[in-house]
């Protein structure tokens, strides 16, 4: 179970951290036409480029992303092989540790609960203070303690089951969010009544896990 702290983590944009696949480098003159259901994040993710670089190449679109219209032609920023290789490695590591943290914390829970645990990791990653990768969040130490008890007890290193792997892929490949705003989760049966986390605003309970802000 998580060991929770009032100090939350993350220093990377969720969009940049969620990327999983890459495509070959694109020339600066390349463009893409917005399709139904597209967002700047989805376009950046599908092409293995960072959201920030896509926004920088299209300042008018990034200023009003909610007004992104079907048929809009966007410029694709230049990237290079070194940048692509680095991003690919980070994406693989993010997936690896997402699979492991979900398995360690919710391997026996439903797929919905497993995805929700992954969402909490991503919320912390996007929070802006404690790390650039899923690994950083999982192994973060605050007030002298790991934030997830599965790290010191070794459960984090167990081989993920198929359900946890599928949940990790879903978390990192989509923007679906089972528990918007959740930064903590806990099992009431394993959490002392005096724990501060019980005073946090509850978002929902899925299976044995309560998700809160």
Image (tube, rainbow, N blue to C red):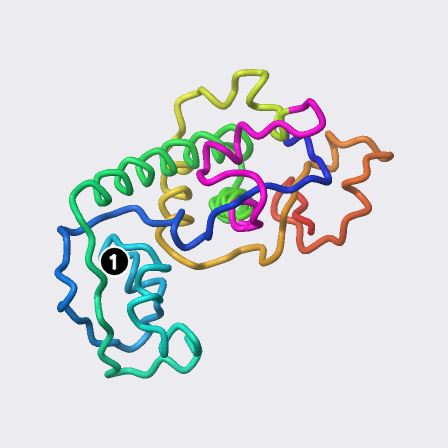
Span shown in magenta: 123-145
The answer to which image quadrant residue 70 occupies is bottom left
Task: Looking at the picture, tell me which residue is in the foreground, 116 or 125.
Answer: 125
Quadrant position of the N terminus in the picture: top right
Residue 109 x %, y %: 53, 38
Residue 94 position, x and y percent, is 38, 37
Q: Residue at x 23, y 62 (%)?
A: 77
Please name whichever residue, 186 or 41, is drawn nearer the observer in this view of the structure. 41
Q: Is residue 71 left or right of residue 180?
A: left
Q: Which residue is mark 1?
A: 46
113 or 83: nearer the eye? 83
Residue 10 located within the stretch drawn in magenta? no
Furthest residue toward right: 194
Which residue is found at the position 19% from the left and 71% from the top? 32
**Does 92 sit above or below residue 156?**
below
- Establish if 6 lies above or below 158: below
Tell how many labels.
Answer: 1
User: Is 128 within the magenta?
Assistant: yes
Q: Residue at x 85, y 35 (%)?
A: 193
- Helix, strand or loop at label 1? It is helix
């Amino acid at each position: 179970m998580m060991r929770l702290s009032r100090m939350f983590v993350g220093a990377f944009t969720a969009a940049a951290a969620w990327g999983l696949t890459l495509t070959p480098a694109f020339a600066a003159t390349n463009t893409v036409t917005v399709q139904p259901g597209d967002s700047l994040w989805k376009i950046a993710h599908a092409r293995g480029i960072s959201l920030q670089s896509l926004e920088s190449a299209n300042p008018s679109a990034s200023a009003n992303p909610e007004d992104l219209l079907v048929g809009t032609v966007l410029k694709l920023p230049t990237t290079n092989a070194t940048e692509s290789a680095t991003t690919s490695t980070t994406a693989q590591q993010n997936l690896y540790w997402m699979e492991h943290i979900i398995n360690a914390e919710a391997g026996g829970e439903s797929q919905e609960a497993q995805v929700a645990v992954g969402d909490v990791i991503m919320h912390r990653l996007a929070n802006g203070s404690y790390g650039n990768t899923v690994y950083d969040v999982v192994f973060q130490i605050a007030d002298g303690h790991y934030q997830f008890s599965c790290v010191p007890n070794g459960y984090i290193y167990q081989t993920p089951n198929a359900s946890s792997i599928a949940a990790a892929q879903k978390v990192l490949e989509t923007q679906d969010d089972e528990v918007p705003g959740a930064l903590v989760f806990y099992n009431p049966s394993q959490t002392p009544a005096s724990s501060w986390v019980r005073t946090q605003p509850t978002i929902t309970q899925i299976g044995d896990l309560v998700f809160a802000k």
